Image (cartoon, helix red, strand yellow):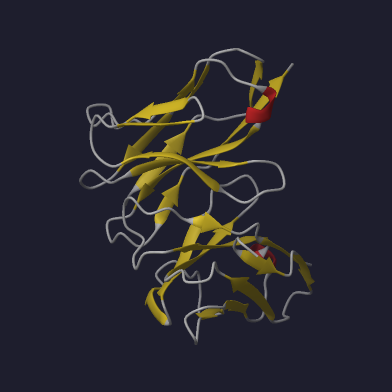
Amino acid sequence: GDSVTQMEGPVTLSEEAFLTINCTYTATGYPSLFWYVQYPGEGLQLLLKATKADDKGSNKGFEATYRKETTSFHLEKGSVQVSDSAVYFCALINQAGTALIFGKGTTLSVSS
Amino acid sequence: GAGVSQSPRYKVAKRGQDVALRCDPISGHVSLFWYQQALGQGPEFLTYFQNEAQLDKSGLPSDRFFAERPEGSVSTLKIQRTQQEDSAVYLCASSFLGSGSEGEKLFFGSGTQLSVL
């Protein structure tokens, strides 16, 4: 079945460092791909999405490109801030279009 | 309120008890989803409603789990005869459009943390 694999955390970075969180997927066809973020004490929020191959999703300085050749959707940010500390989830939409399938999440901790 | 509201925020149950978890979606949102998030894991899909119709319940782990949305707004997730493995955060999400398909933005609640002792 469809699945998402994320790099294990936690990821610990200093402010202004470059961030990459790897995400690969297994799916039938080319589902839409998403990154969700969960800040401490808050609900999951959509960070960015891409709906077809080679699309680049971007928001708040974060980017991810839908790569069908490598079945990947890695999250990147050029300069992280302390406020980016959160748990990040990669996800895809299931074949039926009725549910998101999430990875296990990657905890990011940014220190000043 | 403006967001998805879930209650209670925390629930402690003794093994074998029945529990009911409530979700108030954003007003006017057609789609409603329930997810289960175990500690250290990503959310796992349980069930999906479009208005009052339960269109997908393939993720419900057993017949002890039951969800309803009788008037197409508030939803209740009921777990009968709770077991320790039911301990998790239960998340509710809603969206405006009539499906969970691509391009749609889901709004998640903060969840109900269920602990079964």
Residue B104 in the image: x percent, y percent? 37, 54
Image-based side of B91 in relation to A102, left or right? right
The total number of labels drawn is 0
Is A6 in front, or is B74?
Answer: B74
Q: Using the image, determine if residue B103 lies above or below residue B47.
A: above
Residue A103: x and y, percent?
Answer: 47, 43
Q: Name the residue located 24 percent from the left edge and 29 percent from the top edge.
A: A54
Identity of the residue drawn at 65% across and 41% down: A39
| Quadrant showing the C terminus of chain B | bottom right
Expressed as whole percent of the image width and height from the top left, the position of residue B86 reads 64, 66
Q: Percent x, y for residue B95?
A: 44, 62
* Quadrant of the drawing holding the N terminus of chain B: bottom right
Considering only vertical position in the picture, is A17 above or below A90?
above
Horizontal side of residue B10 vs A21, given as left or right? right
Of residue A22 and residue B15, the one placed in the foreground of this image is A22
Judge whether A67 appears above or below A29 on screen: above
Q: Is residue A51 left or right of residue A47?
A: left
Is residue A30 placed above or below A14 in the rendered structure? below
Q: At 50% from the left edge and 15% from the top edge, which residue is drawn?
A: A78
Q: Residue furthest bottom?
A: B70
Residue A65, located in which quarter of the rendered image? top left
